[in-house]
Image: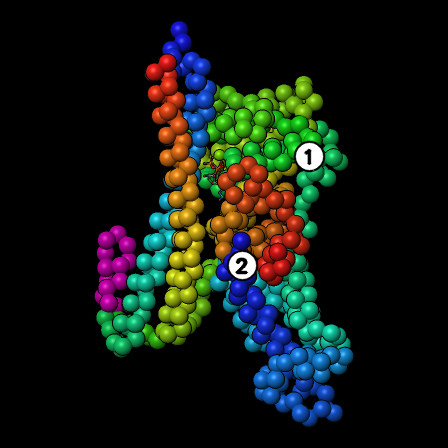
Amino acid sequence: MVSKVDGTDSREVQALQAYLNEYGQQAEVLSRQLDFMERQRMESMAAIDALKALATEKQSVILVPIGGGTTIRAQIIDPDNVLVNIGADVVIKRKNTEAIGFLEDRIKELEALEKKVADSLDQVRGQINEIAKRIDQEYRKAQAG
Amino acid sequence: MFDSLKNRIKTVQEKLSINIQAAALTSPPSLDEGKGKQGKIRLTEKVRTLVRDRELILSEKDIAEPLAELELVLLENDVAFPTTEAIISTLRGELTGKRRRIGSSIDTLVVESLRSALRGVLGSGFDITTYLRTHEKPVKILFTGVNGTGKTTSIAKIAYFLRNKGFSVVIASGDTYRAGAQEQLSTLAQRVETKVIQHQPGADPTAVIFDAVQYANAHHTDVVLADTAGRFHNRANLMNQLEKIKRVIKPDLIIYVDEAVAGNDAVIRAEEFNRLVGTDAIMLTKADMDMKGGAAISIAHTIGKPIAFLGTGQAYEDLKPFSPDVLVGEILGEA
Ligand SMILES: Nc1nc2c(ncn2[C@@H]2O[C@H](COP(=O)(O)OP(=O)(O)OP(=O)(O)O)[C@@H](O)[C@H]2O)c(=O)[nH]1
Ligand SMILES: [Mg+2]
């Protein structure tokens, strides 16, 4: 037997559900992207702090994690020359201050991109709310009628 | 698209113009007023007129600095190293060594040289409609690529695009592995009003695609678009599965799908897929989210296969047949 909810409007509800799922997936992809960029940006900021600290403190000893939860004490022998992966997996030697400048530019770029993705995410979330509202309405109609 | 790359190329372009003007001013011995530095300062229309119609040979030194900067700009935007080298060396070749008349505009010289250098690595593109018109039907197209890059979405987009061009299409739901994949595809296909062939979850994808080809034969359908899983136990198993599909179905085209935003990673993956299962053309998705353009510029050059489509959004209309000229125009800020 066909219930009221599965009756005249059930196809409409199903279509709405499908859209809801899809937008849900899109929102998930976007927020994952956002998280990833946020993490990258934080990492760049941490690296800037480290570079600044090392520049003023010649011959410092730091702890280097070497995996498996183990750490080793190491001495920085050349804090002014930094190896930077500039992109395309190409690593270039830069002066400390240049490396900081590069990271600062990267942070600016990430901020711009994050804004773009956050805007898309807002849009998708808005659509999700719209659809949820409409599904709700359909159910109410079915129950009332 | 490509905002970050675009702005920085513009800067290099300006520096190249300035250097060439300076070189043009210092080169003719009859003119003594323009010594290097002065040329740089007097960047006015007057200078441009002076330079016009003068013949000169640019040396590598004249443009070394802006070229070095361009190299960094390209690398920082994830253009693969060999591709970057190719662009730089074409540009250097275009600009130096030849005795040339500068003509009316140095800017034009710079832009056109950049254009041909970029154009050189982008290949010819791939016109799918011409391909379809000149090949026996049904044309079987297999889509490959890792998970989440946009294969399934792109198949719906391409179905929509081809139907608008007057081709009939059937889609094979060859991702029987990921939960929800078949449902996703049938929803998308319904929206673009395209027939889908599906089996049970976990079924053999080769059998699904085989059925779709049978269907196409029986109904004189022009094109079979075959979706595949992006993840399958592990990468080696995925490759084996694709290998089997390829052996049994003998696709006419294999389109490798990856996302432009993945940059150099996309290029590396594309090489792996090309080596292990083969690729005839590439679809790059999420170009709308890509600030850098590295993958779009390097992928064709690196694996030696043309880009067929760009995906430019989440909706099924968001598909652009790839045109190298349009892309270069975009990068040079003309579009
Ligand atoms: N912005 C944008 N998003 C896209 C584009 N193409 C696909 N997407 C999104 O990317 C996400 C993944 O797309 P799918 O088509 O499911 O990817 P897939 O390759 O089939 O993934 P698997 O089935 O897991 O292998 C979805 O949220 C799509 O909406 C595009 O051109 N631009
Ligand atoms: Mg899929």
- Is B289 above or below relative to B334? above
Q: Is residue B15 visible?
A: yes
**Percent from the top left, x then y, of residue B155?**
56, 34
Q: Which mark is residue B141?
A: none
- Is A54 above or below relative to B220? below
**Percent from the top left, x then y, of residue B9?**
56, 65
- Is B62 above or below relative to A84? below
- Is B142 above or below relative to B268? above
Say which element carries label 1: loop
Which residue is painted at 53% across and 49% down in the image? B287
- Rate crowding at label 1 as few (under 14), some (14 to 19) or many (20 or more) other CA atoms within 10 Å: few
Q: Which mark is residue B165?
A: 1
Tell me the chain of label 1: B
Q: CA distance from mark 1 to mark 2?
A: 34 Å
Q: Which mark is residue B79?
A: 2
Which residue is painted at 69% across and 31% down in the image? B166
Which quadrant holds residue A127? top left
The way the protein has been coloured in the rendering is rainbow
Q: Amino acid at mark 1?
A: Lys
Q: Main secondary structure of the magenta part?
A: strand
Query: What stretch of residues is rendered in magenta?
Result: A62-74
Residue in the foreground of this view, choosing between B64 and B317:
B317
Q: Is mark 1 within 8 Å of ligand 1?
A: no
- Residue under disc 1 on the same chain as residue under disc 2: yes
Q: Amino acid at mark 2?
A: Val
Tell me the chain of label 2: B
Which residue is painted at 54% across and 26% down in the image? B190
